[in-house]
Structure formats: structure tokens, C-alpha cells
Amino acid sequence: MEITDVRLRKIETEGKLRAYVSITFDDSFVVHDLRVIDGNKGMFVAMPSKRLPNGDHKDIAHPINTEIREKIQNAVLDVYNRELEEAPQVKVEPKVEPKVEEEVEEEVEESKEEEKEEEVEETATEEEAEKKEEGLF
């Protein structure tokens, strides 16, 4: 029995789970929901399981001998490590989106225009008050 395909779905969480895996044997039989776990003694592959009413877990599918278990684990971890190496290293930098900069500039321009309008209104109000005092209005 040969492993003919290994597919990973990496998981970005704070827990120990790193990926879900589907593995195909002889291009004819697939097993879903294996898990790559970052354990206390390093990475390992957990077989698909279900939770029992008492809280325990029971494997749904699993290898019967150590040789096949190691073969599965090696194939899965090889693919997992290869994907980690190929993934672009993302450097997290704070970025200011251009849209945000434009919005800030627009707000500054609007506030300048509002200030000018207020000045014009104040000037007009002062002129009206002067005219009233002089009896011209």
C-alpha cells in the first residue's frame, strides 16, 4: 500500500493544532481529518477520531502496525515541512492604507473650508451689526 497524495490545510491558531490532512492510498482510498499536532515532544500526526459521551476520543481509522504509522507520519510531516519552507515569510509591518491618508487629507481640507466660511459669516455679522448701529440697515 503506497501513499499517493497528501493534502494539507494549515491552521493559524494559538493552540497545538497546525494542520488538517487528507491522505490517499494507491490512488483509490482516502482518509480525511488526520491532524498535525505540535506536541511536547515535537510534531506528530493524530489519526481521525470522534469524541465519546464520556469525553474520551476514539480513533475512527488508524494503522495497525508501527511501520505503516511511521510511513504515514513521515509522508505527512515531509509535506507539512515543505509547505512551511515554501511559504513566503511575511514580515508584519504597520501600514497606512492610502485610502485612510486620503480621508485624513479630505477632513483637513473640509475643516479649513469650514473655518473660512465661519470667518466670512463672522465678518458679515460684524458688518451687519455696524450698519445697524449706524442706522444703515
Image (cartoon, rainbow, N blue to C red):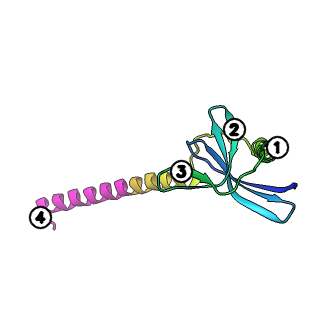
Q: Tell me where residue 65 appears, x and y as whole percent.
A: 78, 46
Residue that mark 1 sits on: 67
Question: Pointers 2 and 3 in contact (CB under 8 A)?
Answer: no
Residue that mark 2 sits on: 43
In the displayed structure, does residue 20 sit left or right of residue 116?
right
Q: What residue type is labelled 3?
A: Glu
- Indicate which disc, 4 or 3, sits on the residue closer to the N terminus: 3
Residue that mark 4 sits on: 135
Within-10-Å neighbours for mark 3: few <14, some 14–19, many 20+: few
Residue at (83% x, 59% y) in the render: 25
- Give the foreground label among 1 and 2: 1
Q: Is residue 127 above or below residue 94?
A: below
Question: Pointers 4 and 3 in contact (CB under 8 A)?
Answer: no
Residue that mark 3 sits on: 101
- Indicate which disc, 2 or 3, sits on the residue closer to the N terminus: 2
Q: Is mark 3 on a helix, strand or loop?
A: helix
Quadrant where the N terminus is found in the figure: bottom right
- Indicate which disc, 4 or 2, sits on the residue closer to the N terminus: 2
Q: What residue type is labelled 2?
A: Met
Specify the segment rendered in magenta: 114-137
In the displayed structure, does residue 126 sit left or right of residue 68?
left
CA gap between label 4 and label 3 equals 51 Å
Front-lying residue, 79 or 32: 32
- Is 91 in the magenta? no
Q: Tell me where residue 56 appears, x and y as whole percent.
A: 52, 49
Front-lying residue, 86 or 20: 20
Residue at (45% x, 54% y) in the render: 109
CA gap between label 2 and label 3 equals 44 Å
CA gap between label 1 and label 2 equals 18 Å
